[in-house]
Image (cartoon, rainbow, N blue to C red):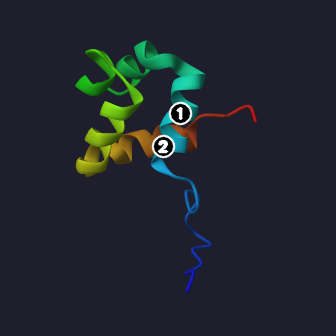
Amino acid sequence: MSEQQPNNPLHGITLEKILTSLVAHYGFDELGILIRIRCFQSNPSTRSSLKFLRKTPWARKKVEDLYLATPMDD
């Protein structure tokens, strides 16, 4: 059964979608400045960044917070 989460603004949005949107909006260079983690600063790629973010809760939280604070053009 699908559990509803009305107070979770990220419900239904994958980490890959979040990262792809942020990279499209800022680029890896700017992301590396806004969120100082090595996966955005040294030889960045979506695949390696996703692998790191899935294993590192504090980094994932920073990325999710930036996504929520960023006005995205749809």
When asked about the image quadrant of residue 26, the answer is top right
Question: Residue 4: image x %, image y %?
Answer: 59, 78
Asked if residue 24 can be seen in this view, the reply is yes
Horizontal placement of 32 versus 25: left or right?
A: left
- Kindly state the secondary structure of the residue where label 1 is placed: helix
Measuring 59% from the left and 34% from the top, which residue is drawn there? 70
In the displayed structure, would residue 34 be above or below residue 29?
A: below
Measuring 41% from the left and 13% from the top, which residue is drawn there? 29
Of residues 41 and 70, the one drawn nearer to the viewer in this rendering: 41
Distance in Å between CA atoms under marks 1 and 2:
6 Å
Of residues 13 and 32, the one drawn nearer to the viewer in this rendering: 13
Measuring 56% from the left and 39% from the top, which residue is drawn there? 69
In the displayed structure, would residue 45 be above or below residue 8?
A: above
Residue type marked 2: Glu
Q: Residues within 10 Å of mark 1 (few under 14, many from 20)?
A: some
Question: Residue 3: image x %, image y %?
Answer: 55, 81
Question: Residue 50: image x %, image y %?
Answer: 36, 40
When asked about the image quadrant of residue 72, the answer is top right
Q: Which residue is mark 2?
A: 16
- Label 1 close to label 2 by CB (< 8 Å): yes
Of residues 54 and 68, the one drawn nearer to the viewer in this rendering: 54
Q: Which residue is mark 1?
A: 20
- Kindly state the secondary structure of the residue where label 2 is placed: helix
Q: Quadrant of the N terminus?
A: bottom right
Q: In the image as oriented, which residue stretches furthest toward the bottom?
A: 1
When asked about the image quadrant of residue 33, the answer is top left
Q: Residues within 10 Å of mark 2 (few under 14, many from 20)?
A: some
Horizontal placement of 50 versus 17: left or right?
A: left
Residue type marked 1: Thr
Q: Quadrant of the C terminus?
A: top right
Asked if residue 37 can be seen in this view, the reply is no
Q: In the image as oriented, which residue stretches furthest toward the front?
A: 47
